[in-house]
Amino acid sequence: MERERGILFVLSGPSGVGKGTVCKALRGKDMDIQYSVSATTRQPREGEVNGVDYYFKSKEEFQTMIANNELLEWAEYVGNYYGTPIQYVNETLDQGRDVILEIEVQGALQVRDVFPEGVFIFLTPPSLEELRNRIVGRGTETEELINNRMNVAREEIEMMQHYDYSVVNDQVDCACDRIQAIITSEHCKVDRVTNRYKSLLGDE
Amino acid sequence: MERERGILFVLSGPSGVGKGTVCKALRGKDMDIQYSVSATTRQPREGEVNGVDYYFKSKEEFQTMIANNELLEWAEYVGNYYGTPIQYVNETLDQGRDVILEIEVQGALQVRDVFPEGVFIFLTPPSLEELRNRIVGRGTETEELINNRMNVAREEIEMMQHYDYSVVNDQVDCACDRIQAIITSEHCKVDRVTNRYKSLLGDE
């Protein structure tokens, strides 16, 4: 049977919803999926490691990557650049392995244009009040920045309709279970396994 | 938040693939899903209970149900009638609970016309050789009937393309895991949770 191409999963959602925490928990599971590392110009938070959590770049370095078409998507968000190096994604999918991207909402919609066959998962807060608590609890933001993030979050939640799936991040483990279910079920989609029935009918 | 309607899952596949075994294994799991019981005119196999495995009907009784539009679908298959009583399915979905139907391929395609929003899962044998072994192993069929079933099975596998998902029944437990993943992921589909983001934006 011809090897099927890997599937690109895009995990996104409003800032503060817990994309990073959910992605870290997914990495702890025994799953055959590769994690793409984004590039960003924002300052590393405590404990974040260059090349693992992000590639931390200067503005000048980032603008060079844009100019050289080395990014699958990029966005400016609250004064910083975020983007996804394209080469790793394509090579991994060609090997028949899945890739998961954890990116901001603006960037995800750009990826949708380039990879319409990708699977787009929107991580949703249980409520806006809970989202505010999480942003405040992070303790890294001023009051003005918190209000700014909340306004952006409201606009981003409107973008949910452009995604395939909506996963509520009520508890990290439950969110992970739902995402793993989505990955499993996408591999069972008939549109993705057309070779399966052809080889089945040819095998007796 | 407005209660969402339940989802109808239709599990089908060629005769002998193990639909009944997989469905029985799913019943043993802790899942909030209701199992529809089909009506049939075929003879009960050993251990099958009326009202649990099937409603066993005479041909006359079955034809009356057809005439009264009491069936969601029905089919004649290798000389017997099979069908799904419609009332239970509609009532259960209206209560916001999921229903799973285990039916033959002909019937599933009829349900697709009435319930386009249903989720159609095709249970696939690992190979045609394995399918023949399972039919022979059942020990209830003559050689002619086995060949007849194999010819029907080949035609039915061509129908896979009209389904949403294809699940290989290599091992019953693996097939169950995949079906459970499909059920979980379908409840995360954005198209099914449009009320979620509206209530999210209205709740602060």
Image: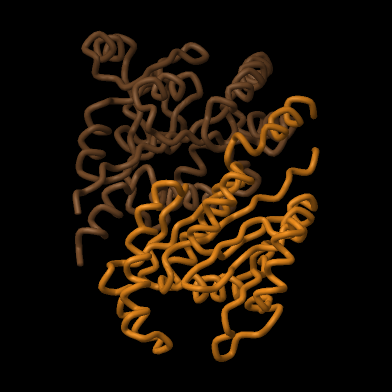
Chain colours: A orange, B brown
Give the quarter of the figure containing the N terminus of chain B.
bottom left
Q: Quadrant of residue A9?
A: bottom right
Residue A134 visible in the shown view: no
Q: Position of residue A112 (x, y in %)?
A: 56, 47
Is residue B190 found left or right of B181 in the rendered image?
left
Q: Position of residue A185 (x, y in %)?
A: 54, 48
Q: Is residue B9 above or below residue B61?
A: below
- Of residues B143 and A23, the one nearer the viewer is A23
Q: Residue at x 57, y 84 (%)?
A: A43
Q: Position of residue A17 (x, y in %)?
A: 41, 70
Q: Is residue A135 above or below residue B61?
A: below
Q: Is residue B43 above or below residue A12?
A: above
Residue B29 visible in the shown view: yes
- Of residues B2 and A57, the one nearer the viewer is A57
Give the quarter of the figure containing the C terminus of chain B.
bottom left
- Of residues B113 and B74, the one nearer the viewer is B113
Q: Is residue B30 above or below residue B117?
A: below
Picture mark count: 0
Q: Position of residue A19 (x, y in %)?
A: 49, 70
Is residue A53 found left or right of A145 in the rendered image?
right
Is residue A7 found left or right of A171 in the rendered image?
right
Q: Residue at x 72, y 33 (%)?
A: A195
Q: Residue at x 65, y 34 (%)?
A: B134
Is residue A1 found left or right of B179 in the rendered image?
right
Q: Residue at x 64, y 76 (%)?
A: A54
